Amino acid sequence: MATQIEPRPDTATRPRHVAIIMDGNGRWAKARRLPRAAGHKQGVEAVRRVTRAARDLGLEVLTLYAFSSENWRRPEAEISDLMGLLRHFLRAEIATLVADNVKLRVIGDYRALSADLVAMIDDAIARTAANTGPILVIALNYGAQAEIAAAARRLACAVRDGAMEADAIDETRIESELSTHDLPPLDLMIRTSGEQRLSNFLLWQAAYAELLFVDTLWPDFDGATLADALEVFSRRQRRFGGL
Ligand code: FPP
């Protein structure tokens, strides 16, 4: 029989790990008759604010969905704007991340991005690797179904090579193959802009997470909005399948 993952009995009222689907940049810009790029630019400002607020509010991990594996379907010019903003963010924020003792992680197949960005990301990860404070996880070219499929492939290869028995594949083994395996469990998933979908983000990890959909457009999100979300979380009763 497959081993059941023991859900963490959680009496804590503050989440350790919060993930955010940052949505609404385009609508923020449209409402101001600005190009979509202006919305993404303000979105980066929100990333800066919220990263600092997460640290001040005592979160251990903040995971942000910056670019999904489906975002390649956007017009080339918009993809290029987003990559430019990521470049700018890494260049401008690395010193702050180092000074704030924040450790940067990236999940998703970021090696498919342009070579200069991959080098910048690797450099930023290396420069914050020894930091011991909160972890900022940026999801880039990330898709949860692809992540789970890759985990299944690795386990299938291990079985084929005689390194493990097929019967040994259980939830714990699959989880250990995910990019988040060494992070605290996801407690709270927030999506901004009123949309109520997970859009292929952390599907496995969200199994017991609280979901919160807020109307705020991502460029308007700030420390107060995050504090409000944590307040809502603290009033939720988490059951993990029990009573
Ligand atoms: C959704 O808004 C947002 C994105 C697809 C990208 C999020 C990216 C950033 C905030 C900037 C880059 C991030 C970092 C970490 C530097 P949308 O364009 O789908 O908005 P809409 O639904 O209103 O059109």
Image (cartoon, grey):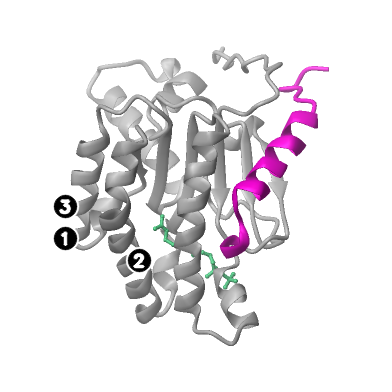
Residue 86, x across and y down, in percent: 33, 61
Q: Overall secondary structure of the magenta stretch?
A: helix
Label 1: which residue? 116
224 falls in the magenta region: yes
Please tell me which of labels 1 and 2 falls first in the chain. Answer: 2
Q: Amino acid at mark 3?
A: Ala
Quadrant of the image occupied by residue 102: top left
Which residue is pictured at 72% across the width and 43% down the height?
Answer: 228
Q: Amino acid at mark 1?
A: Asp
Quadrant of the image occupied by residue 240: top right
Which residue is pictured at 45% across the width and 52% down the height?
Answer: 48
Residue 19, x across and y down, in percent: 55, 42
Mark 2 close to ligand 1, CB under 8 Å: yes
Q: CA distance from mark 1 to mark 2?
A: 14 Å
Residue 23 vertical placement versus 138 (above, below): below
- Which range of residues does the magenta coloring cover? 218-243
Which one is nearer the viewer's eye here, 147 or 104?
A: 104
What kind of element bears circle 3? Answer: helix
Q: Which mark is residue 119?
A: 3
Indicate left or right for 104 with 174 as reference.
left
Label 1 environment density (alpha carbons within 10 Å; few <14, some 14–19, many ≥20): few
Which one is nearer the viewer's eye here, 112 or 219?
A: 219
What kind of element bears circle 2? Answer: helix
Q: Tags 1 and 3 in contact by the CB under 8 Å rule?
A: yes
Label 2: which residue? 85
Q: Amino acid at mark 2?
A: Leu
**Quadrant containing the N terminus in the rendered view:** top right
Q: CA distance from mark 1 to mark 3?
A: 5 Å
Residue 113, x across and y down, in percent: 25, 60
